[in-house]
Image (cartoon, rainbow, N blue to C red):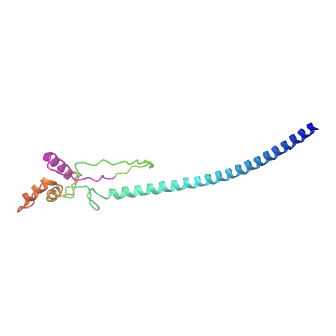
Amino acid sequence: MAEATRYKEGIESLRKHDGMLIEERALRSANEEQAQIQLNGLQHSLGGMEKMQMMMQQQLQTIVEQMQQYNRNKSILGEGLSATNERGNGQQPAAQIPPTHSNGEGCSNTSSHTSFSRLEFPRFEGVDPRSWLRRCSRYFQLVSTITEDQQVPLASIHLEDKAELWFQSFMEGRDMPTW
């Protein structure tokens, strides 16, 4: 009789394990179906994101082209001015600023743009005046829209500290000199 009891217990244990296995299979199947639904949703979202990325790249390309066109119509000094000599001889500036190429993080370098970098007038702090005068002369050659009578006033606003004070006292009662 002990064997019959053990046999019944073994059968009952097998039935319990079979029931648990059936439940586990059903749960796994439901999880697999849910995972497949989520995967399909993610793939659909990825497709939409790829389309949006293409649209954004096209919009950025259009903006870059518009900026290039806009920059072609501008000079270093501002809107409506050309970088050619406007004093009548039609010469190009003596020096050109090389085009810049941007490749920032996350941005593709699919096109380069040719814009003038902002060219700053050299400042003078009272040290090495010959070097400063050479840099000023190169600036005036490059930015040929500045007339001779504008060159000294432009240079004078870039004097600093003692150099500025000296120029102010020098100019008292005098006309503005030419470059």
Q: Which residues are magenta?
A: 115-140
The residue sitting at 7% across, 58% down in the picture is 169
Number of numbered callouts drawn: 0
Side of 107 where 43 appears, left or right: right
Q: Position of residue 167 (x, y in %)?
A: 10, 56
* Foreground of the two, 86 or 89: 86
Q: Quadrant of residue 78?
A: bottom left
Image location of residue 101, percent across then percent down:
37, 47
- Given residues 35 and 150, the one toward you in this image is 35
Q: Seen in the image, is 75 located left or right of residue 156?
A: right
Q: Please state if 33 lies on the left or on the right of 162 as rendered.
A: right
Q: Work out which quarter of the rendered image holds the N terminus and state it.
A: top right
Quarter placement of the C terminus: bottom left
Q: Residue at x 61, y 54 (%)?
A: 44
Camera-side residue of 94 and 164: 164
Q: Position of residue 159 (x, y in %)?
A: 16, 54
* Residue 148 on the magenta span: no
In the image, is residue 133 above or below residue 78? above
Q: Residue furthest left?
A: 173
